[in-house]
Image (spheres, rainbow, N blue to C red):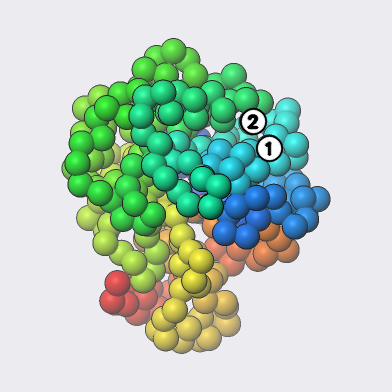
Amino acid sequence: MTSATIPGGTFALSQDLTLTRMGYGAMQLAGPHVFGPPADRDAAVAVLREAVRLGITHIDTSDFYGPYVTNQIIKEALHPYPRDLHIVTKVGALRDADGNWPKALAPEQLRQAVHDNLDHLGLDALDVVNLRVGDFDTPVPGSIAEPFTVLAQLQQEGLIKHLGVSTVSAEQVTEAQSIAPVVCVQNFYNLTHRSDDDLIDNLAGQGIAYVPYFPLGGFSPLQSEQLNAVAARLGATPMAVALAWLLQRSPNILLIPGTSSAAHLRENVAGAALTLPDDELARLNGIDS
């Protein structure tokens, strides 16, 4: 399989950056609760190499996964990176000794986070850095101008190529765009959590990528009788249907489902290739979010 045959094809974030719509989220490469090292580091390395072998060119990560663990494993598995492989990371949080996720939005914290990502990934410049500003899965009202301006300055310094935002409202996206171009928005969204429908459509009209995190429900799998019924009629798994629905929802949606298993990764990629018939798509669209 090549990037040309990965489900959903590709999406151009800019003239110089095109990603496969089916990507890979590295969060699950860390230990339990995204904290500490994985139980099987060799398996973590193997799943990353399998993602590249399958033709995926979009890997999503963060230095606060672990912390530092996933980026170090990515470097071990894939460096020197294939020319068409692009790594998207995020800043704006830390992990404390108890495994909590305190925010880290002060200018010096953001600068340090960018330099740490560069070091742990073995890169001279980061393809995309998302500024994560909200709570765990919900935007928090207020200005994001100060932290986003810091990343815009780092972009001007050549350490970041493109900027994105995460866990933000539509108003915060607009504010960020007044400071520097935004190529992607990464928010909580899936078949049963669709509060961002209007934002997705607005971004699609601007040619901006929308990257839903927790596309399969997060730490608790999606629960929906309608989803299960559609999957049964199609002879597919509910997770395959949920991924296929996202790809058909809007052409600017990019997927980053995570797994620590190479076999599960192959299942995700194969399942996302499912084409949902119009009648089943309508049933899924009618699920209450």
Residue at 24% x, 29% y: name it. 145
- The three-letter amino acid code for the residue at tag 1 is Gln
Q: Nearer the viewer, residue 18 or 25?
A: 25
Residue at the farthest front position: 97
Above or below, 127 relative to 142: above
**Where residue 61 sits: x, y (%)?**
55, 43
Label 1 CA crowd tier, 10 Å (few <14, some 14–19, many 20+): some
Helix, strand or loop under label 1? helix
Residue at 57% x, 35% y: name it. 86
* Mark 1–mark 2 CB contact (< 8 Å): yes
Residue at 42% x, 49% y: name it. 211
CA gap between label 1 and label 2 equals: 5 Å
Q: Nearer the viewer, residue 51 or 74?
A: 74
Above or below, 121 relative to 278: above
Q: Name the mark on residue 72.
A: 1
Quadrant location of the C terminus?
bottom left
Q: Is residue 213 left or right of residue 106?
A: right
**Where residue 72 sits: x, y (%)?**
68, 37
- The three-letter amino acid code for the residue at tag 2 is His
Q: Is residue 79 left or right of residue 133?
A: right
Residue at 33% x, 42% y: name it. 133
**Can you identify the residue that label 2 sits on?**
120
**Where residue 260 sits: x, y (%)?**
68, 58
Label 2 CA crowd tier, 10 Å (few <14, some 14–19, many 20+): some
**Where residue 208 sits: x, y (%)?**
34, 40
